[in-house]
Amino acid sequence: MTDKYAQLVHHGVGRNVAKKLGLPQPAALRRYQPGQPLITGPVLVQGNSADADNLAAELLSWDLDVRRHAVPREKLGAIILALDEVASPGDLEKPILTAAASLRDLAPGGRVVTVSRPASEADSPAAAAARQGIDGFLRSLAKELRGGATGNGIVLRQGVQATSASSLAALRFFLSGRSAFVDGQFITVSSASGEPARDVDQPLAGKIAVVTGAARGIGAAIARTLHRDGATLILVDVPAAGDQLAAVANEVRGTALQLDISRDDAGQRIIGHAAQRHGRLDIMVHNAGITRDKLLANMDHSKWSSVIGINITAQLRINEALLASEHFRESPRIVSVASTSGIAGNRGQTNYAASKAGVMGMVRASAPLLAAHGGSINAVAPGFIETEMTARIPFAVREIGRRLNSLQQGGRPTDVAETIAFLASDAAAGINGEVLRVCGQNMVGA
Amino acid sequence: MSIDGQSTAGPEEAGSPTAGTPGLRKAVIVGGNRIPFARAGSAYAKSSNLDMLTAALDGLIARFGLQDERIGEVAAGAVLKHSRDFNLTREAVLGSALSAETPAYDLQQACATGLETVVGLANKIKLGQIDSAVAGGVDSASDAPVVVSEGLREVILDLSRAKTLPQRLQILGRLRPKDLAPLAPGTAEPRTGLSMGEHQALTTAQWKISREAQDELAYNSHRNLAAAYQAGFFDDLITPYRGLARDGNLRADTSLEKLATLKPVFGKNLGADATMTAGNSTPLTDGASTVLLASESWADAHDLPKLAAVVDAEAAAVDFVHGKDGLLMAPVFAVPRLLARQGLTLADIDYFEIHEAFAATVLSTLAAWEDEEFGRTRLGLDGALGSVDRSRLNVNGSSLAAGHPFAATGGRIVASLAKQLHAKGRTDGRPARGLVSVCAAGGQGVVAILESL
């Protein structure tokens, strides 16, 4: 599962050869460790809007070193670009080119974060053009950044302030090492709801969370990350994976629930377990999924139906049970694992991509149902992640999968887990019905 | 776990008339965990008793979230046991996710070991000595101890005491080639030299148990176990181990026809009357099981389920050495004594779990209970003890299908029965009762009654 190439091109001969040949030299990403500083240097807040001022004041209260104007040759941890007041495409140039002058000072692992408003049909054509323009700008900038730096954006719906709980939570997420493999992406904050975390190192303290498919890979990483963030865990996997599940459960001091999630009563079993042991359930992470790859011409009933059944139908059925349960009522959160295959498509994965795109559709349509209880539902779409599963992909295909993104490397299971933990936190309650990619800005798809 | 919890054995915990001795609090079964049982020499061939018991324990800890918990006491044992495993259970606790401050002891009562750990620990809970306990058992027929001959052993010990070279040479001179052959463990009874199977063959013939009846019992065992797996019954009773997710001995596709083709392996001196085959006898098996026991207050304080209470238990032994009774017939005597003490009859039992050492053991037991003469003369009753409703017998399969790692069988039965009783009690809206019967080497047997909560 280790990326030997990435290790090779960082030292001695390997580094020189890679440099001379112009081969990709993937950077070591800055990943979150509890207790580490949020960002590695001063934060430049660029822009003249009221939101820019408010954000700068807020970041100061986080004990960050904040700059409203660039200091020449000072290394920057991040550049925040407030573009929320652009009214026509001509308005983009000044703030963007001012920020551009500081790009060379961005430290390795640095961050660029735009703050903007969504383009909508209600806008004047010029305003919509300016707002939509930010999309293309940011995604291109993210592809230019090097040294493990990333560029992402926060899109604030009408009426949502840049200092709303979820806007700040998104900003903290993008600035931190938690978003190491999230690149070229936008998070839309649709409402002002959300409670700032009392302890930013334990944002899930006191929460009861279920993780399906928790015996290994991304699921086990999600369990470890949610545990680190303070959640109490119920770990679900098929009975046949029970030994690995038990090992993870004992590691994170949770309980193991051996359960085939495609059973009709899976939702009831999960609620029953949570109710018995903890009296309630706060967070449901749908991670369990399978692949049964085959070209469509060779697809059969069992390969199609098992993938659809486990990857999407089971989630729908479990969510239905959860939403009907009195034990899932206090700011309930659901986070589903989708896939970039469901966005861009993937040869040989018609069944899998249908199921994962289905997850995204489900998430959007379920958002109002969760919002009714002060809750939220979102999806995370991983790109190429280094797991046992991707380690079995043939070498050449695997190398292409790894390198074809802005960060020139595969993500780690923890990268997916960090994003899920963020979306599961109460601070992120204003983010609802969204799909967030964790793909290092994979070249395929949107 | 609070100190208060230990001393609040109030009258509210005394329970119903059959739920134990009045004045004592209840000992409840929270649940269990075992690893799938494997035929000897297969999936667990390289696993030690310590490995398997630790795995079963860790699965239990994971199921119920007992990490770092200081359990009142853990008791387990093995029948085939290495001398290095003198503290087997404590070592398993130390290797597990439990608190290292959890005390443990080993117990050994042949095949009744597992059930006896349940009984002993339940009694401690009832007395208020402990609030929580894990009972268990493990056996490996694959990793069995192989010992040196008595002659070689004496030479080695004498050598260690010798002081001079001539003494050592003189001691070595006593060695004979035959002393160098290792001794593998057998299941032969020390006082009769007969294996368990040969003993049962005598009993089988005595009670005229037919080959067809034995094969039918074996068939039902496989069928019931397979159906239980199919229904997901074992989802919260078993944790896979070493690539095995189901009992390796289970033959879901077996048939009466297939069983009928097997040749007799025991009682061959009976000629055409030999009825006991590899199909209707349990194979040598590796495996481990655990059961979580608690006081009601401990289970409540930990938000854990309460499946059933351990009501009462009885041990018995028979004089098989002089042929008065069959080696495995002790439960025949223990059950009537237990039922009488509890004021119950066979008709009051919703589920029977009679360990299938051999199909013929179960059938001989049932035959003895149905026999008027035996009831009067041997059990001291007015007539026959009664009949066991076959639809209530070993409903989720038993040892013929699952296999029988000697000391692990008791835990397997108790956890499964407690779950079955709990479901039955919920359905019927009244407590459901179950009877466990386990026969053991040395002419012993332990039986117990559980009642759903």
Image: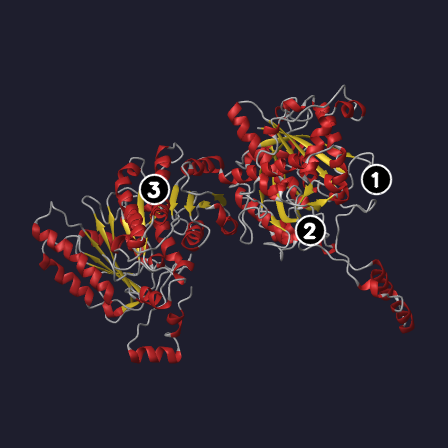
Q: Is residue A128 above or below residue B436?
A: below
**Comparing labels 3 and 2, the label whose residue is closer to the camera:** 3
Identify the image quadrant of the N terminus of chain B. top right
Name the residue furthest left. A125
Q: CA distance from mark 1 to mark 3?
A: 63 Å
Camera-side residue of B433 and A287:
B433
Q: Is residue A213 above or below residue B453?
A: below
Query: Mark on residue B349?
Result: none
- The image quarter containing residue B309 is top right
Answer left or right for A238 relative to B290: left
Same-subunit check for callouts 1 and 2: yes
Residue at the spot of label 2: B88
Amino acid type, label 2: Leu
- The image quarter containing residue B363 is top right
Q: CA distance from mark 3 to mark 2?
A: 47 Å
Q: CA distance from mark 1 to mark 2?
A: 31 Å
- The reply to whether dot 1 and dot 2 touch (C-beta < 8 Å) is no
Amino acid type, label 3: Thr
Q: Position of residue A429 (x, y in %)?
A: 31, 43
At x 68% / y 22%, what residue is drawn? B344
Q: Residues within 10 Å of mark 1 (few under 14, many from 20)?
A: some
**Comparing labels 1 and 3, the label whose residue is closer to the camera:** 1
Name the subunit of mark 2.
B
Residue at the spot of label 3: A313
| Image coloring type | secondary structure
**Comparing labels 1 and 2, the label whose residue is closer to the camera:** 1
Same-subunit check for callouts 3 and 2: no
Q: Position of residue B422 (x, y in %)?
A: 55, 30
Residue at the spot of label 1: B321
Q: Position of residue A409 (x, y in %)?
A: 34, 65
Name the subunit of mark 3.
A
